[in-house]
Amino acid sequence: MSSALRKRWSDVVLGSLTVAGVALAAASAQAADGSPKRQLDPAFPNYQPAYPDAAQVNGEQGDVVLKVRVNEDGHVRNILVEKSSGYDDLDNAAIGGVMRWRYLPSPRWSSWEHVTIAYRLPTAVVIPPKPAGSP
């Protein structure tokens, strides 16, 4: 792809790209050890992790599965990558974003929560302009 075409494509598409979805891996309301799952604090702005611009331009996408250590006051204290997306920039963006999340406080000292961050590029549809004089 020529640099001019890539630039045009990125101008059209990149302006509307976001992380396709942030999904807590919550198939049930209980963690693997039988204890209730921790919930994100709705009073805190738990933003979706950013989708790095370079990853979007390079067409990188994938799922990052994280194991997140949350202490009793709801702060994230440690993160392990359980399954990589295959791209360091996506993995690092997911870790950086989730480190800023806050969970509701819990009487338990700490817990490990599983989080899946899904990075997906939308399908771009470029509609060419109509020729002059056509209806």
Image (cartoon, rainbow, N blue to C red):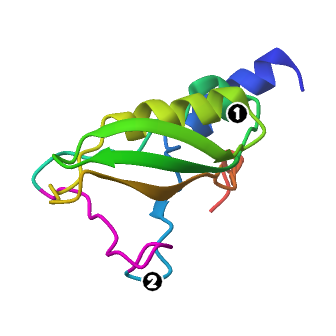
Q: Rate crowding at label 1 as few (under 14), some (14 to 19) or many (20 or more) other CA atoms within 10 Å.
A: some
Left or right, 133 with reference to 35:
right
* Residue drawn at the location 49% of the way across and 43% of the way down: 16
The amino acid type found where label 1 is placed reads Trp
* Residue closer to the observer: 104 or 14: 104
* Residue 117: image location, x then y, percent: 54, 52
Residue located beneath label 2 in the image: 28
* Residue drawn at the location 62% of the way across and 41% of the way down: 81
Left or right, 40 with reference to 14:
left
User: Secondary structure of the magenta portion, mostly?
Assistant: loop
* Residue 49: image location, x then y, percent: 44, 40
Left or right, 87 with reference to 64:
right
Magenta span has 39?
yes
Residue at the outermost top position: 3
* Residue 42: image location, x then y, percent: 15, 58
Residue located beneath label 1 in the image: 9
Magenta span has 33?
yes
* Residue closer to the observer: 131 or 16: 16
